[in-house]
């Protein structure tokens, strides 16, 4: 089956080659875990390696911030915009949603103009201010995600989680049902050092690696590495060595 | 005595006029198209901020409330300025459902003027002249 490669070493392996085309893929993580970097790398790889132009819909950061961040990884987003391969659109959830619902809206125009195949929505968390009612919010996001699929786009949506370490509380899981792929980025404390972990929780219509992998943000972007070995409770944020758990469970009795 | 005093005042005024005239001529030493753009369209500091914002975000279409938030201004401050820029053809206003949204006008001539204006604004001398015209414009 055809795959939409992220270009992130290790992640494409976990996804059996990449995302499925025209799907919505959620990246959730605490501030600084690398959600936006992962999304930018997905867009960059599409443009330079797959000939697939991209769109970034931002609800918070100015385009200048993306130009600067991308430059740190050696990605010239400004040049890509000049070449018509990328559009960075600063907008709001309510306007982008209404625009996509209208016939011949601006975003649709930009997609057609650039022949975009990929989109990064940074971040879907901002939709939460449109409704406090979970069912209505789910319906709003569902409609938005479907509009992007209708336009033939493979989407990466970022979502902020509040907790820096461990499980995030109070997160509405409705979004987890709407998306096709659900990837978690987490900080993990191991031997008094903070590392980063990545887990593919769900991938609709495809098998995927269920391991928890370490990853780093390098000068060339995200690099997903080997699984955490010999430890458990990784996603709790404070993993234990498996041997310690064994001792605790059996030997000390 | 009175006549002497009047003559002195008259001479002072003449000098001031000359100085003003000289300053005005010095300040008007810029591209005529840009000068007109500045005097007729970007004739306030808030408008300057707004056109700069739309120059940096040429694909943005949004409500006055959101644009105010992005520009770090209050909605009351920018509402009239957005309306003026729309009337003057720099921005365009559209209805999106129940929302009134603003975006950069597609007219290539206006976009070119805006590009020239923002580029020129990087130069300190131009900024000084532009500030002079905006202050003079707001006093009139």
Image (cartoon, rainbow, N blue to C red):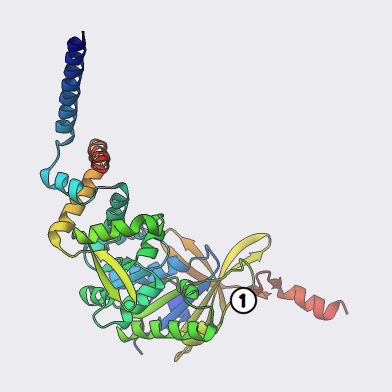
Q: Position of residue B2 (x, y in %)?
A: 21, 11
At label 1, counting other C-alpha atoms closer than 10 Å, the crowd grade (few under 14, some 14-19, many 20 or more) is few
In which quarter of the view is residue B91 placed?
Answer: bottom left
* B115, above or below B106, in the image: above
Residue position marked by numbered label 1 in the rendering: A170
Q: Is residue A65 visible?
A: no
Residue with the most extreme bottom position: A205
Which quarter of the rendered picture does the C terminus of chain B lie within?
Answer: top left
Residue with the most extreme right position: A253
Q: Residue B127 vs residue A185: left or right?
A: left
In which quarter of the view is residue A114 placed?
Answer: bottom left
Q: Secondary structure at mark 1?
A: loop
Q: Which residue is located at x 30 percent, y 55 percent?
A: B50
Q: Which residue is located at x 36 percent, y 62 percent?
A: B67
* A15, above or below B63, in the image: below
Which quarter of the rendered picture does the N terminus of chain B lie within?
Answer: top left
* B137, above or below A230, in the image: above
Q: Position of residue B75 (x, y in %)?
A: 39, 59
* B40, above or below A238, in the image: above
Q: Position of residue A43 (x, y in %)?
A: 35, 70
Q: Position of residue A45 (x, y in %)?
A: 34, 70
């Amino acid at each position: 089956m055809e795959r939409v490669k992220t270009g992130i070493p290790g992640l494409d392996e976990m996804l059996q080659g990449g995302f499925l085309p025209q799907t919505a893929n959620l990246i959730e993580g605490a501030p600084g875990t690398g959600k936006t970097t992962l999304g930018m790398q997905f867009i960059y790889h599409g443009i330079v390696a797959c000939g697939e132009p991209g769109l970034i819909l931002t609800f918070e950061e100015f385009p200048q911030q993306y130009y600067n961040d991308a430059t740190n990884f050696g990605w010239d987003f400004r040049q890509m915009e000049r070449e018509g391969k990328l559009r960075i659109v600063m907008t709001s959830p309510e306007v982008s949603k209404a625009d996509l619902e209208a016939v011949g809206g601006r975003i649709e125009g930009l997609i057609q103009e650039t022949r975009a195949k990929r989109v990064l929505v940074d971040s879907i968390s901002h939709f939460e201010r449109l409704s406090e009612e979970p069912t209505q919010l789910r319906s709003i996001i569902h409609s938005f995600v479907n509009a992007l699929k209708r336009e033939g786009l493979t989407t990466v949506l970022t979502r902020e989680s509040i907790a820096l370490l461990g499980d995030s509380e109070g997160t509405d899981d409705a979004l987890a049902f709407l998306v096709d792929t659900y990837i978690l980025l987490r900080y993990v404390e191991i031997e008094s050092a903070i590392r980063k972990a990545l887990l593919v929780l769900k991938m609709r219509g495809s098998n995927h690696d269920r391991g928890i992998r370490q990853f780093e943000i390098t000068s060339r972007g995200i690099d997903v590495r080997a699984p955490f070995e010999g430890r458990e409770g990784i996603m709790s944020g404070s993993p234990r060595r498996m041997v310690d758990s064994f001792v605790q469970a059996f030997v000390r009795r | 005595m009175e006549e002497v005093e009047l003559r002195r005042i008259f001479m002072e005024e003449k000098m001031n006029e000359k100085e003003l005239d000289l300053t005005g001529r010095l300040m008007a030493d810029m591209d005529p198209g840009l000068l007109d753009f500045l005097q007729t369209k970007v004739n306030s500091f808030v408008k300057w901020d707004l056109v700069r914002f739309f120059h940096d975000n040429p694909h943005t279409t949004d409500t006055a409330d959101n644009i105010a938030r992005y520009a770090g201004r209050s909605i009351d401050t920018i509402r009239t300025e957005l309306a003026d820029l729309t009337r003057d053809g720099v921005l365009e206003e559209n209805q999106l459902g129940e929302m009134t949204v603003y975006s950069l006008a597609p007219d290539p001539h206006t976009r070119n003027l805006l590009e020239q204006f923002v580029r020129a604004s990087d130069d300190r001398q131009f900024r000084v002249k532009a500030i002079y015209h905006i202050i003079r414009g707001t006093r009139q």
